[in-house]
């Protein structure tokens, strides 16, 4: 094995926070949660890919973190007396990013995952130091593209973009090699026996080569789910890790519940597609949906919540414990369930739509969006009340609002008062039987073509802002008829459930459903998936956390 080179350059201003030195009093407190042991120079303490990696504090001697690549190693860090190892994977229990080895004989404190979680949950001072260091270490790995996966692809390929997004949204560092830009790429492909036509490829830990893999194949290759023991009965299973599900996970786990989250794609849900959430309490300069989700997910893990990256495909609710069936057929039993599977905004069937989402295509019309298009022409698509409200609101600050509806008018789909307001607004025009058919632009939307579906006539406009208000479809298809839904497919809860509906659903208790409780006792709905919910990050977070107080009550019943 070649000698490792010098450590990769850390952002200098942060290196003290990334590798802080604990005081002797702090080290003594860590020691009460683990055991003290000796190490010999060259001893490997953690191998790359190991699950449930321990946490080490160096008392004497030195440890090193290295990234193995074939027969060579890259030195990532040297951990000296008073410093500690680890990063986010200690919390998640997922495969270790690096190999940890003793550089010298010495003495260390070793904590298993349970001991580590106990420490960060009970010692506020150490929790702050350790969690900050872990998060910054992960940020550094992400920024420098140092991880246990390599993606080889092209910037022009949609699958490459999908794979890169999957890694990014899951906060998983990876190295990216571009077919068009990196000189040595052909020799790497030859070595792997991969042709350009088979790209993008993902190389897991320098060993397994996946040709244009699905997200599920990547998760399985990197062992995202292996640390989770899914099949025992959990206090609470949360399906969906958008803002509502993450809030339930943080509150549930911090209040002592055994929590498992099931999420198809990545933590964050729809909020992850927002580049800057400006209206979430406490973030006056805004926060990206991804960052909010990453913080919430780390917080949930700190309290012991676990997450399976897979899809809930069926709910069984005829007897307790209830069961969530996963796409591979595994059944996860639970005493209580929070359904937080959100909704998908109906999108325009246009090929390059996703390129402009958040950059000219919007699904909300708040003051934030209104400021982006002040004094300009805008388009509102949709004929329902949300479209009407958006159109009237935007007309106050924009030059002109073109309202496009597919049908013959608004009378069947919109409240009368809104129709009147639309008629009385001079800078608002209604185009019936009209659809957007194409979008153009580079980084931001620059032009829109619409078409009259009756005459076939098209019109091209230099308009840079389109508000899509064509409704949202709830992700409730997997619920297997378990809970009562409203006429749009959203879950009915609490007082919205009529006595007739409860009788029809064989509600077995003398009490009525709690707030956020569905027509099945102990199965709750929170966030966008719930009928009557206000479709905002803050309300999803609020509902996710409120649901937990009722989960405690039903666990006592
Ligand atoms: C582009 C965009 C910008 C937005 N901007 C703002 C904003 O600035 N401010 C604001 O307040 N709100 C904003 N919103 C609205 C806000 O994001 C949502 O109201 C909020 O995310 C709802 O949270 P949720 O947890 O209920 O559902 P979601 O965010 O929809 O999350 C649901 C999660 O469940 C997962 N899931 C679905 N089905 C399954 C299944 N069967 N098994 C496992 N997992 C499943 C999904 O993958 C997803 O991660 C925006 C929405 C969009 C689309």
Image (spheres, grey):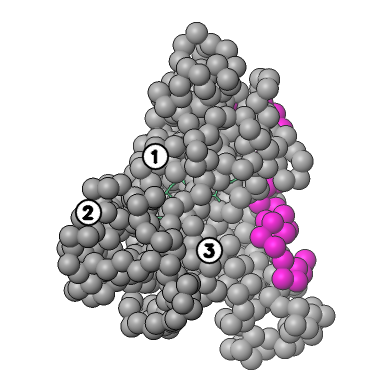
Q: Nearer the viewer, mark 1 or mark 2?
A: 2
Q: Is residue 128 above or below residue 193?
A: above
Which label belongs to residue 420?
Answer: 2
The x, y position of residue 24, in whole percent, is 41, 42
Q: Is residue 433 above or below residue 312?
A: below
The Cα atoms of the two marked residues, 2 and 3, are separated by 46 Å
- Circle 1 packing at 10 Å, graded few (<14), some (14-19), many (20+), is some
Q: Is residue 183 above or below residue 372?
A: below
Q: Nearer the viewer, mark 2 or mark 3?
A: 2
Q: Give the extent of the magenta segment.
A: 207-235
* Location of mark 3 (residue): 168
State yes or no: residue 209 in magenta. Answer: yes
Residue drawn 72% across and 59% down?
217
The Cα atoms of the two marked residues, 1 and 3, are separated by 29 Å
State yes or no: residue 67 in magenta. Answer: no
Horizontal side of residue 153 vs 346, given as left or right? right
Query: Which quadrant of the figure has residue 187?
Result: bottom right
Secondary element under disc 3, as helix, strand or loop, is helix
């Amino acid at each position: 094995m070649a000698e490792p080179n010098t450590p990769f350059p850390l952002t200098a201003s942060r290196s003290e926070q990334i590798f802080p030195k604990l005081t002797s009093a702090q080290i003594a407190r860590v020691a009460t949660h683990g055991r003290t042991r000796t190490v010999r120079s060259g001893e490997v303490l953690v191998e790359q890919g190991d699950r449930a990696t321990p946490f080490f504090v160096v008392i004497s001697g030195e440890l090193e973190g290295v990234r193995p690549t074939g027969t060579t190693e890259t030195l990532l860090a040297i951990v000296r007396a008073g410093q500690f190892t680890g990063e986010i994977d200690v919390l998640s229990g997922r495969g270790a990013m690096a190999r940890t080895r003793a550089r010298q004989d010495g003495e260390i404190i070793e904590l298993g995952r349970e001991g580590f979680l106990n420490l960060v949950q009970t010692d506020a001072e150490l929790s702050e130091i350790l969690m900050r260091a872990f998060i910054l270490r992960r940020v550094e790995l992400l920024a420098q593209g140092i991880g246990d996966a390599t993606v080889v692809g092209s910037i022009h390929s949609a699958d490459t973009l999908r794979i890169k997004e999957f890694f990014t949204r899951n906060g998983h560092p990876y190295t990216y090699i571009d077919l068009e830009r990196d000189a040595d790429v052909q020799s790497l492909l030859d070595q792997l026996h991969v042709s350009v036509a088979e790209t993008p490829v993902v190389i897991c830990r320098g060993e397994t080569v996946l040709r244009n893999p699905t997200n599920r194949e990547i998760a399985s290759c990197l062992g995202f789910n292996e640390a989770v023991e899914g099949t025992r009965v959990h206090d609470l299973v949360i399906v969906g890790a958008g803002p509502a599900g993450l809030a339930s996970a943080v509150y549930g786990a911090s209040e002592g519940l055994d929590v498992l989250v099931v999420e198809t794609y990545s933590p964050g849900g729809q909020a992850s597609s927002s580049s800057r959430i400006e209206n979430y309490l406490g973030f006056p300069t805004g926060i990206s949906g991804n960052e909010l989700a990453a913080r919430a997910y780390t917080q949930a893990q700190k309290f012991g919540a676990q997450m399976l990256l897979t899809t809930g495909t069926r709910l069984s609710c005829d007897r307790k414990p209830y069961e969530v069936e996963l796409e591979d057929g595994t059944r996860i039993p639970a005493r209580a369930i929070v359904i937080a599977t959100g909704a998908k905004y109906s999108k325009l069937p246009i090929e390059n739509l996703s390129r402009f989402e958040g950059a000219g295509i919007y699904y909300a019309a708040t003051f934030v969006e209104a400021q982006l298009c002040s004094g300009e022409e805008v388009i509102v698509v949709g004929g329902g009340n949300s479209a009407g409200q958006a159109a009237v609101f935007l007309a106050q600050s924009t030059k002109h609002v073109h309202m496009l509806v597919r049908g013959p008018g608004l009378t069947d789909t919109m409240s009368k008062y809104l129709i009147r307001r639309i008629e009385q607004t001079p800078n608002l025009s209604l185009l019936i039987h009209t659809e957007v058919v194409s979008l153009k632009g580079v980084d931001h939307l620059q032009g829109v073509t619409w078409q009259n579906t009756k005459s076939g006539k098209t019109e091209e406009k230099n308009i840079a802002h389109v508000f899509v208000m064509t409704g949202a479809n709830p992700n409730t298809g997997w619920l297997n008829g378990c809970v009562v839904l409203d006429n749009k497919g959203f879950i009915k809860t609490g007082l919205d459930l009529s006595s007739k509906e409860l009788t029809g659903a064989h509600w077995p208790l003398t009490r009525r459903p709690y707030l956020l409780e569905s027509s099945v006792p102990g199965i709750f709905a929170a966030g966008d998936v719930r009928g009557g919910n206000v479709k905002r990050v803050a309300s999803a977070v609020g509902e996710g956390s409120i649901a937990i107080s009722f989960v405690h009550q039903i666990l006592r019943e």
